[in-house]
Amino acid sequence: MPPVELTPEQARRIQLHAQGLLGRVATTHRGGGLRGDPGARRALGALRHLGAVQLDTISVLARSHELVAYARLGAVGRSSVERAYWNGTAAFEYWSHAACVLPIEDWPLYAFRRRDYLHRGRHWHRTPEEACKEVLARLRSDGPLTATGLGGAKKGGEWFDRTDHKIAAEYLLATGEVVCTRRVGWRRVYDLAERAIPAELREQDLSDEECVATLVARAGRALGVATRADLADYVRVRGEQVDAVIGATGLVPVEVGGWSTAWAHPEALAEVPRGRHRTTLLSPFDSLVWDRKRTQRMFAFDHRLEAYVPKAKRVHGYFTMPVLAGGRLIGRVDPAREGTTLIARKASVEPAAANTPGKAERAIAHLAEALREAAEWVGCDAVRVERIDPPALAAPLAAALN
């Protein structure tokens, strides 16, 4: 039977639906200690649907993981998102696409990566063996602790300043002896995996091939339709690992015009994606756009994070958030806050919309909607745009906002 043929437009709509940004996805989740908080249950359901939500230290409007839930669920309470992720029983942190929060039931699927770290004997740094013993002993005797509690955080911060105890805790987290299922503020709370992970999950013994096959299948479900490179990037495995397990994933080959060989989840092909498109600001770490090459292929959109680019060399801004509307990435916003005012340091509309009569008006209306909704979500009662590109759209945007 020949592969299903899809147009790039069909592939794009399939991805939007698979990512929970076109129509409604089943995001209600029962359990996890979230009774009485429907927002937290929805946020946890969205996490399970995506498979992974990337974490990052930067907070402008909100933390990136909060923005991912907001983009799909609308004005879900930020405290509900935090409760969904850090309640100690429903999710854990680990290395997936990057540092991610993951559903607790996926613990067995990362055994292949834990074994690899154990074989290597290190994570980022040389691992002090004596410090590992001390960390484990402290956790056994004193219960869950932050890096500060372990004596392992320097004044500058936990993510980049490393003492022997911090290095040891991170290595033990990588190998699975230690786990993080809660945070206090932005500080990881380390605990023994034997105490924090349910026994039925710890006792599952999957081979490397079983782990990778299941994760690649999950990536296919979350993306809808994807190339080999897309699947590998979503869960950060090698292309040859995808090749070795693709036959066991249940994904089916498809042909998309202008793409290399691609694969689709059968559910994504079962019906035409329908529903309301989300109009929203996206975190630059959102799984819809975290793969730059895929974003360019899907949306003809050059997505770059410039937070670590010298200020004088930035083109779009420090924490530039793509604007999603009508299933397209129509522009960008570099946001900030001053009191109860949301500020767009710089906003821009993509040339394809800005230079086309009719499209420019719709793009401005969508941009204004995205800014107003984001402002309300973070508790702001005003929006101020300092700069817009092209400048001719400044007056229409001001009118739309007012």
Image (cartoon, helix red, strand yellow):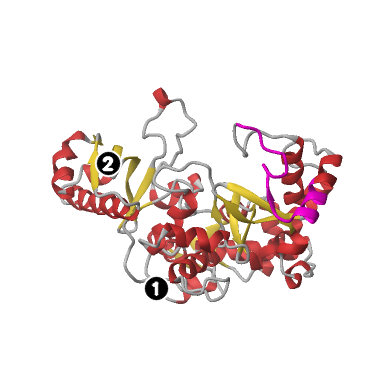
Q: Nearer the viewer, residue 134 or 98?
A: 134
Q: Is residue 114 above or below residue 305?
A: below
Numbered mark located on residue 175 in the image: none
Q: Which residues are magenta?
A: 135-155
Q: Is residue 329 magenta?
A: no
Query: Would you name the residue on which mark 1 appears?
Result: 272
Image location (x, y in percent) of residue 373: 29, 55
Crowd rating for badge 1 (residues with CA inside 10 Å; few <14, some 14–19, many 20+): few
Local SS, label 2: helix
- 157 with respect to 275 (left or right): right
What residue is at 18 percent from the left and 44 percent from the top? 397
Going by the numbered disc 2, the residue's amino acid type is: Pro
The foreground one among 341 and 20 is: 341
- Earlier residue among tags 1 and 2: 1
- Residue at 76% x, 67% y: name it: 202
Q: Is residue 36 left or right of residue 369?
A: right
Mark 1 to mark 2 CA distance (whole Å): 29 Å
Q: Which mark is residue 351?
A: 2
Residue 150 belongs to magenta span: yes
Percent coordinates x, y for residue 209 in the rendering: 75, 62
Q: Position of residue 94 (x, y in %)?
A: 65, 53
Q: Please tell me which residue is depicted at 47% across the width and 76% down the height of the picture.
A: 270
Front in this rendered view, residue 282 or 338:
338
Pick the quarter of the image with the N terminus. bottom right
Residue 245 visible in the picture: no
Residue at the far top in the pictured view: 312
Residue 336 in the image, given as x and y percentages of width and height: 35, 39
Callout 1 amino acid:
Val
